Image (cartoon, rainbow, N blue to C red):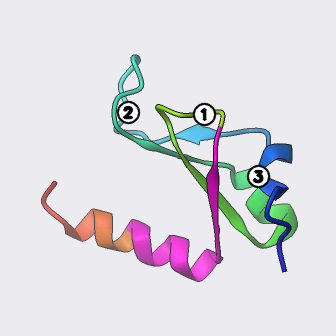
Amino acid sequence: MVSPQAWTQVTGWVSSSYSGPEGGQCVQWAPGYAAEHGTVPVRDSKTPEGPALMVSPQAWAGLIGFARRSAV
């Protein structure tokens, strides 16, 4: 189980490749944390001070797959 405050220790956030230089309306994730802990932190790029969702790698893969299939 992940601590409710685990996201406060996360570093190495990565922005979406669709996020322009100004940021925009994108999400960020922390691949280093995900690789080390097996939980993927996801946050709103407009609110980097938090909070963040902590999701399973399977849930993250599902979200990415959905986004790729969607005409957004």
**C-alpha separation, residue under disc 3 versus residue under disc 1:** 11 Å
Task: Give the mark nearest the N terminus, 1 or 2.
Answer: 2
The stretch drawn in magenta includes residue 40: no
Can you tell which mark lies on residue 68?
A: none
Task: Give the farthest residue toward the left.
Answer: 71
Circle 2 is placed at which residue position? 19
Is label 1 in a helix, a strand or a loop?
A: loop
Identify residue type, mark 1: Pro
Q: Is residue 31 above or below residue 70?
A: above
Can you tell which mark lies on residue 48?
A: 1
Are the residues flagged by discs 3 and 1 in contact, CB closer than 8 Å?
no
The stretch drawn in magenta includes residue 53: yes
Stretch of the chain drawn in magenta: 50-64
Q: Along the line of sight, which residue is nearer the eye, 32 or 4?
A: 4
Quarter of the picture containing the N terminus is: bottom right
Identify residue type, mark 3: Trp
Task: Give the mark nearest the N terminus, 3 or 1.
Answer: 3
Q: Is residue 49 above or below residue 72?
A: above
